[in-house]
Amino acid sequence: MTRDQHRDISITSGDDFEAVLAEAIEQAVQADVDVRGAWEFQTNGRTHAWDVVIDELATDLDDK
């Protein structure tokens, strides 16, 4: 996997960020990657360190 797969995508808003994040999570789940939990990483070439926590929320199946 390369880290620059999304360089051609413009993320200029929270909605853009959420859409890219949702796509990445969905692709990982479809590949049987357990995305739940804390993910610590540093951005490439930057001094920023991040901790991202992914929790699966319960859904009410009766609403569908």
Image (spheres, helix red, strand yellow):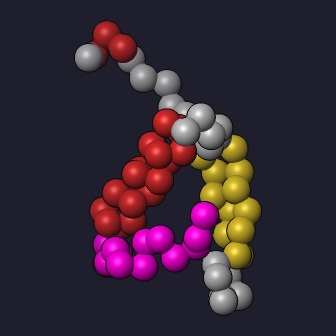
Residue 55 visible in the shown view: no
Q: In front here: 64 or 25?
A: 25
Q: Is residue 51 above or below residue 44?
A: above
Q: Residue 51 placed where, x, y %?
A: 69, 62
Q: In front here: 51 or 8?
A: 8
* Quadrant location of the N terminus in the rendered image: bottom right
Q: Residue 42 placed where, x, y %?
A: 70, 75
Q: Is residue 23 above or below residue 36?
A: below
Residue 11 visible in the shown view: yes
Dominant secondary structure of the residues highlighted in magenta in the image: loop
Q: In front here: 37 or 10?
A: 10
Q: Residue 38 placed where, x, y %?
A: 71, 51
Within the magenta stretch, is there residue 17?
Answer: no
Q: Quadrant of residue 3?
A: bottom right
Within the magenta stretch, is there residue 10?
Answer: yes
Image: magenta residue range: 1-13
